[in-house]
Image (cartoon, grey):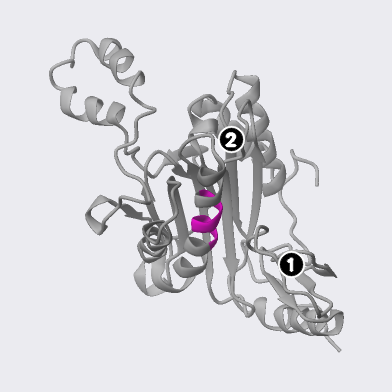
Amino acid sequence: MHPHLPPVFDNVHRTSTYAAGHHPVWPYAPLPPGPCWTHATCRCGWTEIAESHSDARALARHHRRYAAEHPTYLPGTALRIGGRSHQADATGTHMSITGARHGWALADGIGDTTSAAYAAGSTAALASCVASDRGAVGGLLAATGILAGGLTGDTVMVVATPLPPAHGDGWDIAWVGDCRAYEYDPDTDILTQLTVDHTYGQQLRDTLAERYRDRPQVLEDLAAGQDHVVTSSVATATLADIGHVTTTGPRRRLLLTSDGVHQYVPHASLARAVRTFSDPAACANRLTLAARYFGGTDNAAAMVIHPVPAPIAAELVP
């Protein structure tokens, strides 16, 4: 797909099956020996595992038959390790086999350790799954239970899921720490930040805004040095600590980022990438490349969620 052409998403529910050596959602989970484990995946983000190739193909046919009856979203993700020893950023995508429930999460592990990477990966996978059924806040609270169960790592996270028409038909966003969510409006060409960072730097901006009203740059210089200190995380969050925001439909393109992207890439460049690259995966990849171009050395993660504007007819299934 050419990045400068309007998106054309024909055959959205394009599935594939292939032999599996690990779990499709959490790659560090080994599969027991015995069956011929096979993945079934779709470009819309749905994935499942079966004990044989024929079972996987049957699941894929079932998905194609029913998913087109529901709103469809195309997710694109990109991760870059930067100058770190571990990739402690992670993403999670969940879609039910019938396409009725969706959830997405992006996590940024705190620290450059194996435990931080494990915390980010495991919580992102669980949060996206639970959020598809219980909402964004429910997904994030479920993730806190993993880390409270004895894992030594910690992470910050943003979780997203679509709201049903009865509740506004927009996005449902929950977060802790400094992962962000943005929504792009193509009619006005404006990329709006939906979240507010839970960092000590942001606290300084909020509490000292009046005192430094005539010296905004002085305040910004003071706060910027503390933007790396988060004031909430998945391991420590309670319901009162979780940031939560909803939007009103129609749903537009959603962007989730770790601080390895938005701390380095200027807002105008974020908006330009979301506007220019119609393919969500290409857009996410370009944003992580831009982080390196602008001097970023941290892990960088981006997820672009594109709502398909109209139902796509399912292909005929024998």
- For disc 1, the marked residue is 42
Comes first in the chain, label 2 or label 1:
1
In the picture, the disc for residue 53 is: none
Q: Is residue 122 located in the magenta-colored stretch of the structure?
A: yes
Residue type at the position of mark 2: Ala
The residue sitting at 45% across, 39% down in the picture is 110
The kind of secondary structure the magenta stretch mainly shows is helix
Quick one: label 1, few (<14), some, or many (20+) residues within 10 Å? many
Percent of width and height locating residue 76: 66, 50
Quick one: label 2, few (<14), some, or many (20+) residues within 10 Å? many
The answer to whether residue 253 is visible is no
**CA gap, disc 2 to disc 1?**
25 Å
The residue sitting at 69% across, 45% down in the picture is 278
Q: Quadrant of residue 284?
A: top right
Percent of width and height locating residue 313: 73, 76
Circle 2: element type: strand
Q: Is residue 5 above or below residue 19?
A: above
- For disc 2, the marked residue is 300
Q: Nearer the viewer, mark 2 or mark 1?
A: 2
User: Which region is colored magenta?
Assistant: 120-125
Residue type at the position of mark 1: Cys
Q: Nearer the viewer, residue 312 or 110?
A: 110
Percent of width and height locating residue 187: 52, 44
Left or right of residue 170, residue 317 in this image: right
Left or right of residue 283, residue 167 in this image: left
Q: Is residue 98 above or below residue 302?
A: below
Tally of numbered discs: 2
Q: Is residue 206 located in the magenta-colored stretch of the structure?
A: no
The residue sitting at 75% across, 55% down in the picture is 8
In the image, farthest residue toward the left: 211
Circle 1: element type: strand
